[in-house]
Amino acid sequence: MKAAGILLAGCLVISVTGNAQQLTQYVDPFLGTGGHGHVFPGAAYPFGMVQLSPDNGDQGWDWVAGYHYSSNTIAGFSHTHLSGTGIGDWCDISVLPLADTNGATAPLIKIPFRHDQEKARPGYYEVQLSNQVKAQLTTTERVGYHRYQFPGNKGWLRFDMGFAINWDAPLAANLQLLNDSTLVGYRLSTGWAKNQRVYFAARFSKAVTHSRYLNLEEFSDGKAIGKQSKVLLEFETGNVPLQVRVAISSVGTEGALAALNETAGLSFDAVDQLATAAWEKELKKIEIQTTNKELATSFYTALYRTCIAPVLLSDKDGRYSNHDGKIGQSLNDQPKYTIFSLWDTFRALNPLYTFTQPEKVPVFINSLLSFYRDNGLLPVWDISSWEANTMTGYHAIPVIADAILKNIPGFDVNLAYEAMKASAYQQQRGTPEYIRFGYLPQDKHGWSVTITLEYAFDDYCIAQVAKKLGKKADYAYFMKRAASYKNLFDPSTGFMRGKDSTGKFIEPFDPLLSEHGFEGQYIEGTAWQHSFFVPHDVAGLAALYGGKNNLVEKLNALFNSPSEMHGDNISIDVSGLIGQYAHGNEPSHHIIYMYTALGRPDLAAEKIRLTVDSMYKTGPDGLSGNDDCGQMSAWLVWSALGMYPMNPVSGEYTIGVPLVDAARIQLPNGKTLEIRTKKINKSGRTGVRSIKLNGKSIPVQSVTHEQLLRGGLLEFTIHP
Amino acid sequence: MKAAGILLAGCLVISVTGNAQQLTQYVDPFLGTGGHGHVFPGAAYPFGMVQLSPDNGDQGWDWVAGYHYSSNTIAGFSHTHLSGTGIGDWCDISVLPLADTNGATAPLIKIPFRHDQEKARPGYYEVQLSNQVKAQLTTTERVGYHRYQFPGNKGWLRFDMGFAINWDAPLAANLQLLNDSTLVGYRLSTGWAKNQRVYFAARFSKAVTHSRYLNLEEFSDGKAIGKQSKVLLEFETGNVPLQVRVAISSVGTEGALAALNETAGLSFDAVDQLATAAWEKELKKIEIQTTNKELATSFYTALYRTCIAPVLLSDKDGRYSNHDGKIGQSLNDQPKYTIFSLWDTFRALNPLYTFTQPEKVPVFINSLLSFYRDNGLLPVWDISSWEANTMTGYHAIPVIADAILKNIPGFDVNLAYEAMKASAYQQQRGTPEYIRFGYLPQDKHGWSVTITLEYAFDDYCIAQVAKKLGKKADYAYFMKRAASYKNLFDPSTGFMRGKDSTGKFIEPFDPLLSEHGFEGQYIEGTAWQHSFFVPHDVAGLAALYGGKNNLVEKLNALFNSPSEMHGDNISIDVSGLIGQYAHGNEPSHHIIYMYTALGRPDLAAEKIRLTVDSMYKTGPDGLSGNDDCGQMSAWLVWSALGMYPMNPVSGEYTIGVPLVDAARIQLPNGKTLEIRTKKINKSGRTGVRSIKLNGKSIPVQSVTHEQLLRGGLLEFTIHP
């Protein structure tokens, strides 16, 4: 792309000229570690098994990733971290460097540090602890690489199998020194993920001079056993930093030992460079041009966060441990991934992957299908192969449907279709009652409105696949189910409302009522936030309101309603409020783009700019809610490029308003799509005035996946 | 001695002809393991450090030696056991053989057994457990020697540092495999003995094939640490018994490892033979002739029990651990002993030692003086170097005084005298008030009557030593204190009674009241049992009663009173009752011999025979009360020989009535004393009619230590 001509050199912040400029410099791993972003600042590899990151040793909702910027202590560097979730778990295999052995036997050690002594970039984290130990962390896919400079001639590492956050609790663990420089171990824990297995193998650059195991239950044939077990290892480091490579596996210590080969012969610095290169490769997939440094940081940090989860679960040989302890092998002998936060990611992150991760999309889908094979159903929320059944819907379906409808090869479509239908006919989670009544009666199951609307959408997805596969009966049947949302519309209030089995709306009704827990009509939020989830049939929804204009008015009212909520148990997940629009939680994410679908791209542009300005900032407080494994970030990536998959399976991207000056996107087929914006000032209007695709005007409505895959230039003329 | 002529060969049960007959065959280690004897059945070495004996795994007063015949389970074989005490402790370093690993991780394992599968003799114990393991135990001074035949080709041993009985609880412990056939460890515990340290070193005849440590707190550099720590060791034994040698030390594992040399190159059978020989040597010191097999068993079992405690505390190099953790070396570089149950043993056991243990008497006294040097006062109840201050009096004084008065060499008399006076002036245990008031007022200190009488006797002992050392002022002073007993005599009731600080008797008075605990006037018993403790001045006591006949009548009343006791908290230690005479507890032990002192040896003989018949039996129920480290047994040894040290420091032995037909006693000076009884039947009389010492008649009153040391023949003519 030769876009240099349209910008003054002095304004250039990020070039799209293909120079060897490091895009990783725009990523701030601390962004979102404050507030309720729930992301971690440590070292990760794209979609890798290891997320080597500091844990504060504090508990609570804002420490679900082990770390929150409000804390000033570090209790260890553990190897697995969830990115932006609403529930805490993982933080397995915690390692803490100690400068002496005072207090080293305590159940928990929290070493103070200052944030100005901390640095991070993709694949790298460092901190100077108050105990005078300098810690540096980097990682490969399966190996966390630690480098510790101790203040004296000796140093100590504490491996703590008992370290746990929030719901998580160890059920069993062991530790074993295989020789004077190799420690292996195992941690079985329960929490959000039940029966989660993490094996590890740690190799030290120096021999262990003393070992001290703590909190054991047993010590058998050299193996320390105990769910709270810890080991304190002493090293005579002299003045040389101690390098520690810790590989993990869900299968066994042999798998972890084999994984150490990822770093065989590699220094810390070499691995750091490899991690940087891997991240650079990811970020380069979308190069943007902007004079807004904050936007650059938000954008690339968001793009970085779209590449943390799904998380690799399998060893190099493709084997992984299922939650039931059985050893599995993923379909097509592909790597197996876990962490499918599908209620969040089906909306915008998975569609983004059809551009940014063309090779991984079928691998992810095969992971979902392997889950189906292993456990009988597609996952709802797959954490470490455990079906947490967190949240509502059966949203593996839109992910798979999108891939089928976009003709992405690499998985068994028939098996996929069978799996999708199995979800749609499952005998749990309100599905039978939803089918029987045409809506889920609230007296049969909580969250009945959210579930009905989400099932209806998911059923629409199946219908589209059925149509593509020529299964006409299925198409007709699931299209009927796709209209189920209409059964809960209350024209008198203009909201989707819960009904009981007799068909009566639940009374009294308060659109500001938020009931966290299993008994509410809406999951995490109010009627305002949940009434517009009909991404597959905006026209149908508008008809319920008496026409498009009425629905536009209702959306306006959404943004203009008071931000208050009522109830004894208001959901903490509802955040990032503009009126009752809650950008901090996913049910709102598609709503702005409905304006465009309703013929008002100007209002979409207005709300997008408002949302980005108020909800995406730089710094630790930069996220308005849980990043939810990249969905919150994916919204920004799409929106910055001027479009969004309002209906995630439609193969269309609804137009918003581009925030960047230009962008270059590597397309799955090897082609390149360039985006440019041309700003014109005209009073009385806002947003996109016109769009040209390769010189040809297209409506300010949407652009198709197929159109974009042709590559070339997508030119927006916008009112800034 | 040529005594064969006086007995028909057919009636001979025990010969005194010097044949190689094994006297150990008459010892029944199970005698007294039922009832309240509180003795252990396992393998001991005379005064050795190790008492390797089975523990039932049950708790309670009758399990203070780990084992009670009423139990039918074995939880392990531990290496230290108290013999006949009233409080439980020790049972350190418990080893349990297992035939499989089912349930091997349980906190406590109790393996059933049947008593008909059990055998024991001095220095040897065996049992066939229900898990098909045959266990055999023997011992040297410091090394417990185990032999286990397992039913399969493999066997397991569980060493349990957490095993504890009654008050005892581990404070710290560790275990470490030094190599594939050596386990060392340590146990620090608190209980009756505070800060008791036992280190051990175990060597196995087979290599350990698997080790499994349980209940750890730490595992440091090969050392398992945890107060409840256990290790399960696997051995591939094939069909060969596993031999295990476990040495112990109070100083350290090095001391225990060094002590293993006691058994270097020795098989189990060889050690068993050495232990048998050592016991045979002890028992041969007093050979008896009797046709009464039960008496032979009672006598030799009693003599055996007089050689268990004091217990060796020091390593071969003379070092021992004091309760404060300091490493000591005993005076004169002699072995250091512990377990001085002085309230019991000063009465008859320590005087017996002046015959049977001439070499050990100065060693024991140097142990007492080392205790004085280490801790500032002579011990009251020395358990593992801890001053338990159990019971009343300062009865190290009579033990030392007896040795001084008998001119036994081998300790520093001046130091001893200083130590005795330190006890008599101690600023605790009621001593200052006893001195100030001439009696211990009950409102100042409980047990005031017992304490006053016992202090008075102990002060008499100091006076006698002062006299011998030419310290006339001290003599006069302590003789005055020796008369303190008179201050508590109540002529109106004929009892010693508690007074308050104003000199008034405590009212109301009930001579059958027994108040266990710290608040009673008498320790463990009633006024009946405690009013006659004036062994140093029977004439003075008689005078208080208005003459000898009146005191004889009072003693008759003692035996004829109802055996009932009153109170909410009657002492469990009061047992073996004949009227209010309680042979099962020590305050009664001298009383019968007071009859002789009062001119009625016939009544003494009558009561002695009654007591022996009713209180010393064979079988598990053979003891009428706690053996109290051999004092109950020593009473029988003396009484069977026709005499008793009624006043333990008088150098006189009061005549009772011999129970044996003949006896041969090895005297400390190498000479031999023979005792013979000649029975005559004359109606209307009982007991000893006349006595000839080397052919010369002596009164039926007492015989002196000096007379006996001349050796020769002591001939009793008795009414049977």
Image (cartoon, coloured by chain):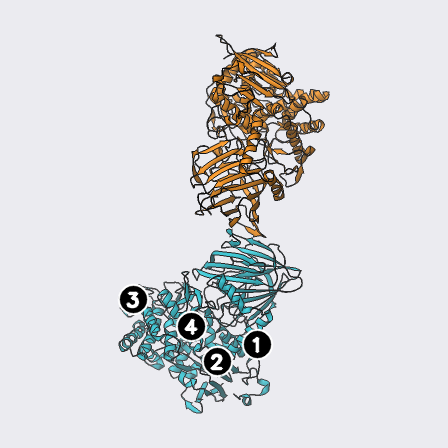
Chain colours: A orange, B cyan
**Nearer mark to the viewer, of 1 and 4:** 4
Give amino acid for label 4.
Phe
Secondary structure type for disc 4:
helix
Q: Of label 3 and label 4, which has the lower sequence position?
A: 4
Pick the front one: B661 or A220: A220
Q: Residue furthest top?
A: A683
**Nearer mark to the viewer, of 2 and 4:** 4
Secondary structure type for disc 2:
helix
Q: CA distance from mark 2 to mark 1?
A: 19 Å
Q: CA distance from mark 3 to mark 1?
A: 51 Å
Chain identity of mark 1: B
- Residue B115 drawn above or below residue A478: below
Pick the front one: B489 or B676: B676
Percent coordinates x, y for residue A399 in the rendering: 63, 25
Asked if badge 2 and badge 3 are on a common chain, one would say: yes
Q: In the rendered image, which residue does mark 2 sit on? A: B640
Asked if badge 3 and badge 1 are on a common chain, one would say: yes
Q: In the rendered image, which residue does mark 3 sit on? A: B432
Label 4 packing within 10 angstroms: few (<14), some (14-19), many (20+): many
Q: In the rendered image, which residue does mark 1 sit on? A: B25
